[in-house]
Amino acid sequence: MLDKTYRPAEVEATQYARWEEANAFASGKRANDAPPYCIVIPPPNVTGILHMGHALNSTLQDILVRFKRMQGYDVLWQPGMDHAGIATQMVVERQLEEAGEHRRDLGRDAFVERVWAWKEQSGGNIINQLKRMGASCDWSRERFTMDEGLSAAVLKVFVDLYRDGLIYKDKRLVNWDCKFQTAISDLEVEQREVEGHLWHIRYPIEGAPDRFITVATTRPETMLGDTAVAVHPEDDRYRDLIGKHAILPLVDRRLPIIADEYADPEQGSGAVKITPAHDFNDFDVGERHDLERINIFDAHAVINDNAPPAYRGLERFDARKKIVADLEAQGLMVKIEPHRHVIPYGDRSETVIEPWLTDQWYVDAKTLAEQAIAKVKSGDTRFVPKNWEKTYFEWMNNIQPWCISRQLWWGHQIPAWYGPDGEIFVATDENDARAAAHKYYGQNDVELTRDPDVLDTWFSSALWPFSTLGWPDTTPEVERYYPNSVLVTAFDIIFFWVARMMMMSLYVMKEVPFADVYIHAIVRDEKGQKMSKSKGNMVDPLDLVEKYGADALRFTLAAMAAQGRDIKLAESRVEGYRNFATKLWNATRFCEMNGCAVIPEFDPASCEHPVNRWIVAAAGRTAAEVTVALDGYRFNEAAGTIYQFTWGTFCDWYLEFIKPILAGDDEGAQAEARATAAWTHHIILKLLQPFMPFICEEIWSRTGATESGLIMLAAWPAVEESWQDPASSDEMEWAIRLVSQVRAVRSEMNVPPGAQIPMHLIGASDVTRARLEKHRDVVARLARFESIELADSAPTGSVQVVVDEATVALQLADVIDIAQERERLTREIDKITGEIAKIDGKLGNEKFIAKAPEHVVEEQRERRADAEATRAKLTQALERLQSVS
């Protein structure tokens, strides 16, 4: 017998240990004719800890792989971790600083050894946290983006791309982190809106002593690197200046005045300074007009020798102060105005990121993107929801060269060696590089220096779908599980990971990496705001697991994962689904206490009693709907369907309907009800297992399941047409409608819960009369009828409600004060009407809509919708009372 109370903390560790001991997550255990199904987990950073995004992502993947295992697929959920170059290096460097050391004191090899030691001892805590969530990855196949096999893949792909002319060195702008002294990716840049200034500066026009062109800038220090002034070609104010020159203040450099649509006549003065070496947009303008690129900063953002002597050696913000002061002294500062704008910060260094001109390694992403675009257009890979294809195409069609070098020590060191004259030799190892150098120079003793940079972490993770399967070797896993079935990920890495996997996989494997890309939503707080440390609204998923259990959190995330809609996570929802787990537990105990045990030879199609034929048919429809929803990645629909069937149909109705049968004297009817209840209960457990695996496995193991082994390896319900019986379904659904309508009226009219009331049925057809006669006792018990009578008209003091063709008259005059109830309802309607008016006032105020945060506006709209629904119910109740005489 199950314990009286379900305790998740006691169950979860035990059941996960059972799964691991049984090797239940392993791939390759099915028969050879079992279809393969493969998902690769987006590899979390080795430094990472579980956040709500991880919890959602892993839950959705786990639902899919558990579902497919039960359907008989040979499932591989490929786990692993990313070495997370800058994040991991920062962790170890911080440890060294605390001990009074620096990585440069250790040297590269010793430092890398220290990082590996940290990784083995402390890295990968997130893997254990994923296990807490119930993740059923094949942990025996866990990979790391710097393990031996993946390193071989990285080397081969780099060398092949280089030899095909798709990797090259170039001097371009990068996001430069002045603290960590490395280029970083856009994903590691945090755009922050700050209060700053807009400086309006006069640039003299060459040959026109009394004429100036005014430019507005948020970064006056970069003017030292200006090489042009741009105006819009259609801007009449400056049309006569196009082709002439301005003189750069403080530097006296001649600047061509060029026409370019980048200049916006509506912004600032309409004229913009162009600094190709220190602004990404200006770099593009410079490319179009063949402008000189003058880098005025060193790696630490200190003014270098390309600037006038007065500013050399000044840190960028100190230089700004001096430049502004000098411009004011020369009368060239028109005005300085407050200006709120966005500044890029390093998400880990917390310093302002500098667009910096430097030599880096690049991938020709534009060429690689061509096939990746075509394969999505052709449907070889599809995005779910489909609207994300537009985002993918927009970025891919405008893709820039991909900077893949990082000035770090932790990572895949770039396999390039330099000869004494700077000649580059790219090879998989130094011996091959030396052989190439010998052939080039004609001598053996050439000194080669290896490139100190490492590869962008995204380079190795771009190979994840096939490198984790053993490529570049030809392995059985590559043959069986590539391409993968689906990728489950968030929208914010469509560019950084999804697109790059598409490009690399098509280049290497000549085939798309996955059939489907499911893009899930963002988990926000209950007000709809994005979670962040600065806002203090972060929710730790493990805290919720400790409080409510992993199953409750998993079901919450799945139930709210509607396609294209972000999740507003309220703790009350998790608590509600914890109550759902309790409901399931209590229903199981009821079945146990009433002798409901699975009979192996039970045929659900053989049931005779309408209530059993009804529940069998409903179970079949539910199983079919859940299957279709999961195949379509409609997780919320699948969760909602099984929730409604379990709590509503099975617990609230079916078990109530069969209580009289179980307590009666008809042994045949009892046996059928027990067998049907047990069979339906097991259908529920199977359908719920992907969502709530812990409680389902616990119940399965404790209730004498007839199918051998674990529920997670049991067969998914196969729906039979013979289960359907429209007549029985119609009959029982009529009883449910009748009782539900009466309960709603009782609630609306404030009828005391224990009050027994007379009911008269008017205008009933022969079918309805027959149904009422058959189910009279159970309907009377569930609706709390004192009596049930057939009548031609409604008695005095009755509230009426229509159910199908018949009218149900409830005599309430002796139970409630009709006049008093009318007054109460009128007051409630007036009150809520006033509330709606206030909300309408806010929503009709343009200033409120423009200034209020989006989540506040949305909250007001939701409040109005709720209030309107409440008013409609109250109005309906009042209308019913108005007809009572």
Image (spheres, helix red, strand yellow):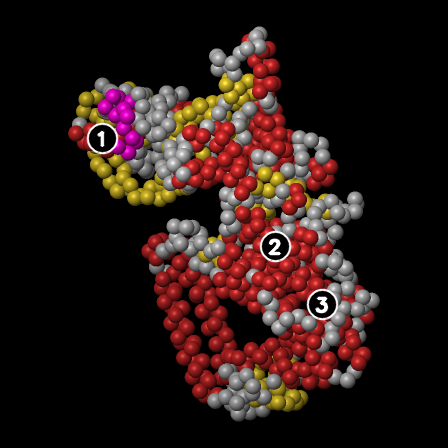
- Contact between marks 1 and 3 (CB within 8 A): the answer is no
Instruction: Give the number of the disc on residue 703.
Output: 3
Residue 427 placement (x, y as % from top left):
59, 21
Check if residue 841 falls in the magenta segment.
no
Separation (CA) of disc 3 from disc 2? 21 Å
Q: Which SS class for mark 2?
A: loop
* First in residue order: circle 3 vs circle 2: 2
Q: Is residue 428 left or right of residue 226?
A: right
Residue type beneath disc 2: Gly
The magenta segment is 307-318
Q: Residue furthest front?
A: 99
* First in residue order: circle 1 vs circle 2: 2
Q: Is residue 25 visible?
A: yes
Check if residue 309 falls in the magenta segment.
yes
Front: mark 1 or 2: 2
Q: Which SS class for mark 1?
A: helix
Residue 446 placement (x, y as % from top left):
53, 11
Instruction: Give the number of the disc on residue 322.
Output: 1
Within the image, what quadrant is residue 582 found in?
bottom right
